[in-house]
Amino acid sequence: MLAAACSGQDGKVVAKIGSEKITEAYLQQKFMEISPSAQAYLATKPGRRQFLDVLIHERLMLLAARKSRVAGDKDYKARVKQKEAEMKEMLQEYRDFTLTKMWVENMRDGELKVTDAEVLEYYEKYPYKVTLAHILMPSYEEAEKVIRKIKAGADFDRAAKEFSLDKETVRLPPVMFGEFMPELEDMAFKMRVGEVQGIVKTPLGYHILKKLSQERTTRDQAVDRVRKILEKKKFDAYLAKFQEKAKVEVLDENYK
């Protein structure tokens, strides 16, 4: 009801406190912050009056604070300056995020565009999805000890829970070709179901794989996944080409 009353007259001044003004638009904004259970009462005439009194009281407090010695206090100014810096950083992050998001969306209609023919061709070449379990170790030597235990008859799942760095995700979700880590992909799709293979190095560490299943994905199920795979491949290729022109250098030895 209050929102309807404000419609078409948002700039109307409802009350003045010195040089300060409270407009219909401000009233509506503050009204929408109130819980729905209280809005019914505040939509009545007594409720609106009481609501306005609260806003007037808040504005009087602000005016009094602006005229107080606290307004010139170093601590107050330091807090405001810190908040301004935080907001400036947040604004820059928002600019960067929004620009990148809109750029990618724009690329989807150009450089990243995937045709139906490309999707069909890829699906016919890679129609399967596989489910894997893995053990992740920090060094080749430690991975070698674990794979020896498994080859000697140790249970893979038990070994994974005992030794793997990635105990929470021993069993990986089913993946199609192109959705998995490139270093492991060829091996994963060539392995037989039930087979254990390794050791393969990736940026995460040293992997031992067990193939749990392989099944053909229907075309309807695969279309969206394949389109995303091909889009990512085009995106990675675009960035790789762009990186050739941009100088990328890791300076800290701990990150090389």
Image (tube, grey):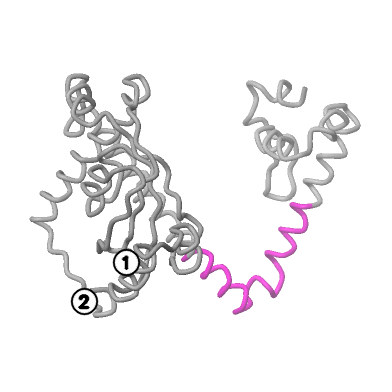
Which amino acid does the dot numbered 2 rest on? Leu
Quarter of the picture containing the C terminus is bottom left
Disc 2 or 1, which lies upstream in sequence? 1
Against 176, residue 147 (above or below) is below
Q: Secondary structure at mark 2?
A: loop
Which amino acid does the dot numbered 1 rest on? Gly
Q: Position of residue 121 (x, y in %)?
A: 17, 24
Residue 247 visible here: yes
Q: Is residue 75 left or right of residue 54?
A: left
Q: Which residue is mark 1?
A: 205
Q: Which residue is mark 2?
A: 251
Query: Is label 2 in contact with label 1 (beta carbons under 8 Å)?
Result: no
Q: Quadrant of residue 238?
A: top left
Tell me which residue sits at (17%, 48%) in the image: 239
Residue 48 visible here: no
Q: Is residue 62 left or right of residue 231?
A: right
Highlighted range, magenta: 58-85
In this view of the protein, which residue sits in the foreground, 220 or 6? 220
Q: Is residue 84 left or right of residue 92?
A: right
Q: Position of residue 197 (x, y in %)?
A: 28, 56
Return the residue found at the far right.
46
Q: Residues within 10 Å of mark 1 (few under 14, many from 20)?
A: some
Against 182, residue 252 (above or below) is below
Residue 65, magenta (yes or no): yes
Q: Which mark is residue 248?
A: none
The Cα–Cα distance between marks 2 and 1, rounded to whole angstroms, is 22 Å
